[in-house]
Image (cartoon, helix red, strand yellow):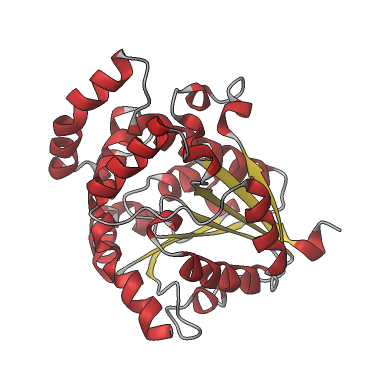
């Protein structure tokens, strides 16, 4: 089972087109940093621009709608966790070309420790791109992770052992879950739940696509197109938010499932036509919310 999951994790190289496209969306909307600019990402974004323009012109959704909604809503709740003092440490799994680590370290300085975790190739690339920033900020790290490993230096627990359990920890995954089957996702959540339980306070933030929000013909066509784009199946693991919450409860986590459009008044990106194609899950160890 572990070998199978590790193989699936390594096969996530197929996600790279979305990582490139998403990275460019963050660049063009002012959410990223200059060091993460990429010519391939720019070219891919430009190639898809006509189809996004057509969809928007006819009142339809765009990839950008839910990419920005999920990113900003995760940022919103991570900010609240940090500013309330509940979290001082963050591990972002499969951080890719996300600027989140750099932006949060810029904002909060030595008040937080941020670990961006990814596959070896991405880690090597990002370390090179952010070398100057990393030298200037000893609490910003980019490390290799095998998210499905049960133990070892590159497991989630291995990364967490480097942190202070008397402080709060947030684990973030963005743009990851729906590229893996349900068993793999439950396995990942089991490890996240176990890790968070070791800390004074813990929280898990992620985006996820549900069947109920992607059942109409337009949404199904959009999901099918996304599958073609990433050269693999997009998995919709749970029919409703209730099913997701029950699964989380069985793993010892209390979970809120957030609808982006409910935050449109606070977060402009959550008002986009396609913002609600995804949901944001905000989970904490059940023992912490009783």
Q: Quadrant of the C terminus?
A: bottom right
Q: Is residue 168 visible?
A: no
Q: Is residue 17 visible?
A: yes
- Percent across and percent down for residue 4 are 37, 81
Q: Please identify the residue farthest to the front as the structure is shown.
A: 217
Instruction: Name the quadrant containing residue 68.
Output: top left
Which residue appears at 57% of the width and 67% of the height?
Answer: 189
Whether residue 249 is situated above or below residue 231 in the rendered picture: below
- Percent across and percent down for residue 31 are 38, 34
Q: Quadrant of the N terminus?
A: bottom left
- Percent across and percent down for residue 260 are 56, 32
Which residue appears at 46% of the width and 23% of the height?
Answer: 272
Instruction: Name the quadrant containing residue 34.
Output: top left
Which residue appears at 48% of the width and 48% of the height?
Answer: 105
Relative to the observer, which residue lies in front, 263 or 26? Answer: 263
- Percent across and percent down for residue 56 are 32, 18
């Amino acid at each position: 089972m572990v070998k199978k999951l590790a193989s699936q994790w390594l096969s996530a190289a197929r996600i790279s087109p979305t990582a490139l496209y998403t990275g460019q969306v963050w660049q063009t909307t002012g959410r990223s940093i200059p060091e993460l600019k990429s010519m391939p990402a720019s070219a891919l974004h430009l190639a898809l621009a006509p189809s996004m323009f057509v969809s928007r012109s006819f009142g339809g959704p765009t990839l950008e709608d839910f990419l920005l909604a999920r990113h900003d809503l995760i940022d919103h709740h991570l900010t609240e966790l940090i500013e309330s003092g509940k979290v001082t440490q963050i591990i972002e799994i499969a951080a890719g070309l996300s600027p989140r680590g750099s932006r949060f370290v810029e904002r909060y300085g030595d008040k937080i420790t941020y670990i961006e975790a990814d596959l070896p190739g991405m880690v090597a690339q990002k370390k090179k791109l952010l070398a100057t920033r990393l030298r200037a900020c000893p609490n910003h790290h980019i490390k290799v992770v095998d998210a499905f490993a049960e133990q070892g230096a590159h497991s989630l627990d291995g990364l967490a052992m480097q942190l202070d359990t008397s402080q709060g920890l947030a684990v973030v995954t963005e743009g990851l879950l729906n590229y893996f089957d349900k068993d793999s996702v439950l396995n990942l959540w089991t490890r996240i739940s176990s890790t968070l339980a070791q800390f004074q306070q813990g929280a898990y933030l992620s985006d996820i696509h549900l069947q109920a929000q992607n059942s109409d013909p337009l949404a199904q066509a959009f999901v099918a197109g996304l599958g073609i784009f990433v050269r693999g199946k997009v998995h919709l693991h749970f029919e409703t938010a209730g099913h997701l919450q029950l699964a989380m409860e069985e793993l010892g986590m209390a979970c809120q499932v957030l609808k982006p459009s409910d935050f449109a008044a606070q977060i402009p990106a959550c008002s986009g036509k396609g913002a609600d194609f995804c949901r944001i899950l905000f989970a904490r160890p059940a023992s912490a919310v009783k």
